[in-house]
Amino acid sequence: MIKKCDFQGCDKAGICRAPKSRDLKEYHFFCREHAAEYNKNWNFYQGMTNDEVEADWERTVFGTPLKDKTAAQIDTADYLNFLNGFLTGRGDFDRAPKRPAAATRGIVAALKTLELSPTATLRDVRAAYRRLAKLYHPDTASSLNAKSAAEKFAEISTAYKTLEKHYKK
């Protein structure tokens, strides 16, 4: 749903989102012109003292300051749990990712038909299909007779459908 620009008196579509406050939970919707003007004048740290800006920057970059002992203890406990899981092999990071399914003979044959390597991507499959379809389509194939062109085109189409299903899993 497209909203109207939040700038007073503007009737254009509000397609650009701009934050209303530092918590970044509520937003204005402006047209491009008014969004640029709003962003030029908006200051994330407006209303904060230099010490507050410095503290916010440190918390963002370095994490919880040591002054906040409760938060620091929670961070320490999380870190120790991480290390314990790592050393004992119980953490999620230690689990081997699911291996991709091995290529079946049908997949290998389809790749061969489309003249592709086993590392081909879906984009490569689509490009090869378009290239070969132009060559072997029965209506446009001049180098082959109509019957052999139709057979080759059917083979290419079947290979493309097989690989498309394989890559979309």
Image (tube, helix red, strand yellow):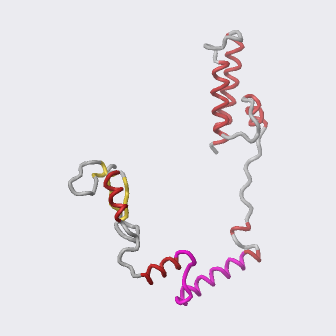
Which part of the image, by quadrant, shows the C terminus?
Answer: top right
Label count reads: 0
5 relative position to 16: left or right: left
Q: Where on the picture, by quarter, is residue 49?
A: bottom left
Residue 101 image position (x, y, % from top left): 74, 47
Nearest to the observer: residue 104 or residue 135 = 135
Which residue is at the far top? 145
Q: Where on the picture, by quarter, is residue 118?
A: top right
Residue 113 image position (x, y, % from top left): 74, 28
Residue 77 drawn in magenta: yes
Q: Residue at x 65, y 29 (%)?
A: 129
Q: Where on the picture, by quarter, is residue 90?
A: bottom right
- Magenta-highlighted stretch: main secondary structure? helix
Q: Residue at x 57, y 78 (%)?
A: 62
Residue 65 drawn in magenta: yes
Q: Is residue 110 above or below residue 100?
A: above
Q: Is residue 143 above or below residue 54?
A: above
Nearest to the observer: residue 5 or residue 127 = 5
> Magenta part of the protein: which range?
60-85
Nearest to the observer: residue 135 or residue 59 = 59
Residue 162 image position (x, y, % from top left): 68, 34
Q: Residue at x 71, y 76 (%)?
A: 85
Q: Residue at x 52, y 88 (%)?
A: 68
Residue 25 image position (x, y, % from top left): 39, 67
Nearest to the observer: residue 37 or residue 144 = 37
Q: Is residue 133 above or below residue 73?
A: above
